[in-house]
Amino acid sequence: MNVFKQLWKSLYSPKDIAAFRFQGIGKTILFLFILALVSLVPVMVQVTQLGSSIFSEGENLLLNELPDFEVQEGRLVSQSDEPVTARSSGFTVIIDDTGEIEPGDIRNRHNTIALLKDHAVVSTGPNIQEYPYSMFTGITFSTDGIASLLSSLDGAKIIIYSVIFFIMFVISIGLLLIKVFIFAAVGQLFAKTLEKRLSYRHSFRLAAYSMTLPTIFFMIVPLIGSTIPAANLVNWLVVSIILYLAIKEIPAKKKRLA
């Protein structure tokens, strides 16, 4: 059975997931690579949309609608005494060196970049990413410096996107593997409770395929503009349930006759 058919079966059939425990580890790792790519689809869409808007409108926004700013010794210094917000057709930029705005204040804002007192914050919806200014060594982090950088990088957008997506993929597959290792151990606990014979390597395979349904679900949710409260808790709970049901499908241990 090819990996795409396995992906389909893993969406609804614990019995098929249980049967996948005997396949080679290479095919399971390939399956995890595909899941990692699928999970990144919403982020890739958002990054591409945000990047296109920044490259097309960012320079004008910086030079004409925002106060001059510069990062000095890891702190933002702006010519405005209060937070300033400027909006374009595709994204929003906030400048605040007063400390009035906190990263959590921009959560759930669509395509928003906030330059705060000590770090830059990017919000693409329910998730935010924080970047301390110390990360931007070698870059003149100021109005003119960033405007000049955007102008010079405009022709290299494809390369920039490729590097960003590669880094995101490496991080995604790393986190997914950690999650599978954890659930492989959980699977063995389930197996003992259900009196099923299950080695760790087989539990690893079951855990990998149990990730399918929540991965696809949480890929679709942001694409349709929705959010799920306590998404991580729901994700882990669904994986646990599917893994438990898959282990139930494994034949019980044969009891020795006295």
Image (cartoon, helix red, strand yellow):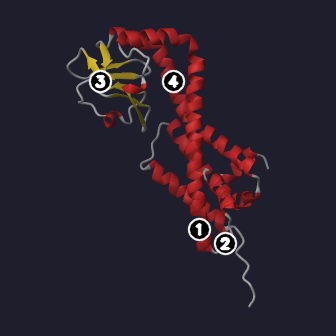
- In the rendered image, the quadrant that contains the C terminus is bottom right
Query: Helix, strand or loop at disc 3?
Result: strand
Residue at 24% of width from left, 14% of height from top?
79
Corner quadrant of residue 143: top left
Between marks 2 and 1, how big is the CA–CA gap? 8 Å
Q: Where is residue 208 in the image (x, y as percent from the top left)?
A: 64, 52
Residue on which the image places disc 1: 190
Decide: few, some or many residues near mark 4? Use Cα within 10 Å; few <14, some 14-19, many ≥20.
some
Decide: few, some or many residues near mark 3? Use Cα within 10 Å; few <14, some 14-19, many ≥20.
some
Residue on which the image places disc 4: 49
**Label 2 vs label 3, nearer the camera:** 3
Please say if the residues under marks 1 and 4 sit with CB atoms less than 8 Å apart. Answer: no
Between marks 3 and 1, how big is the CA–CA gap? 51 Å
- The tag on residue 75 is 3
Residue on which the image places disc 2: 196
Please say if the residues under marks 2 and 1 sit with CB atoms less than 8 Å apart. Answer: yes
> Is 170 left, or right, of 130 in this rendering?
right
